[in-house]
Each structure stands twice: as C-alpha cells, then as structure tokens.
C-alpha cells in the first residue's frame, strides 16, 4: 500500500492519515466507508479544520481523551486519533 493511500488530508498545519495495523487493515477507514455521506462530510470538515488551522476549539467536536488519545467527534460518531512528532494524526 502506497503512502498516498494513508493520507486523508494534507493541510497547512497537519497531515492527517488513516492508521493501519501491520496486517494492512484500518478499522477507522472501514467504519468511515460504512457511514452515510452526511456523516462522512461531518468528519471530513473536522479533518480539514485540524489540518489547516491545527486546532479545533470546540471540545464537543474534538477532545483530549487521556493517555495521548484525542477524538474527532462528528456526532454521533467518534474517531480516536493521536499525534506524532512529525505532525501526523489518526
């Protein structure tokens, strides 16, 4: 699988990627693909904001969950993510 297939969005502040296990599976991407178009749009709007601005100020939309985990929260869904020193998320 090529690097481009991991990338959800490359913004001015962050590049946001799907997380894949060593066996090549991404639970988050599989879940995303099963969502309605409206649910996908809600998630992607948060991804765009994080990628371009570097922060989402609304804790109901993005929140620290503890132990280095954060969550994109496009209601009613929740996508856990983490940050790497390379400024990559999810």
Image: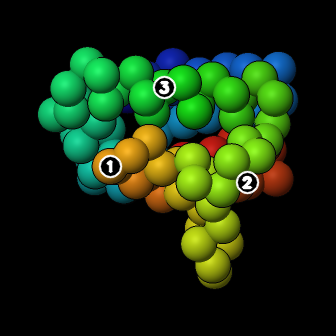
> SS of the residue at dot 2?
loop
In the image, taking residue 65 as reference, residue 5 lies left or right, namely: left
Q: CA distance from mark 2 to mark 3?
A: 20 Å
Report which quarter residue 29 is drawn in.
Answer: top left
Disc on the earlier residue, 1 or 3: 3
Q: Quadrant of the N terminus?
A: top left
In the image, taking residue 86 as reference, residue 32 lies left or right, namely: left
Residue receiving disc 3: 44
Residue receiving disc 1: 76
| 63 or 4, nearer to the observer | 63
The numbered disc on residue 84 is: 2
Which residue, as the protein is rendered here, is positioned at the far left? 34
In the image, taking residue 39 as reference, residue 69 lies left or right, namely: right
Task: Give the label, 1 or 2, closer to the camera.
Answer: 1
Q: CA distance from mark 1 to mark 2?
A: 26 Å
Which residue, as the protein is rendered here, is positioned at the far bottom? 67
Q: Could you tell me if residue 27 is visible in this image?
A: yes
Q: Could you tell me if residue 24 is visible in this image?
A: no
In the image, taking residue 26 as reference, residue 19 lies left or right, namely: right
Q: Residues within 10 Å of mark 1 (few under 14, many from 20)?
A: few
Please tell me which residue is depicted at 81% across the width and 29% down the height of the picture.
Answer: 53
Total numbered badges shown on the rendered structure: 3
Q: Determine contact: label 2, label 3, CB under 8 Å.
A: no
Type of colouring: rainbow
Rendered location of residue 81, percent (x, y) = 55, 55
Task: Give the label, 2 or 3, closer to the camera.
Answer: 3
Q: CA distance from mark 1 to mark 3?
A: 14 Å
Q: Is residue 5 above or below residue 65?
A: above
Please tell me which residue is depicted at 38% across the width and 46% down the height of the picture.
Answer: 75
Disc on the earlier residue, 2 or 3: 3
């Amino acid at each position: 699988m090529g690097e481009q297939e991991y990338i959800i969005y490359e913004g001015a502040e962050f590049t946001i990627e799907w997380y894949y296990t060593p066996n090549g599976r991404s639970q988050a991407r599989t879940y995303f693909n099963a969502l309605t178009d409206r649910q996908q749009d809600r998630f992607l709007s948060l991804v765009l904001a994080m990628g371009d601005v570097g922060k989402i100020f609304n804790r109901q939309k993005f929140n620290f969950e503890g132990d280095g985990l954060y969550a994109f929260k496009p209601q009613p869904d929740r996508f856990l993510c983490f940050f790497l020193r390379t400024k990559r998320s999810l």
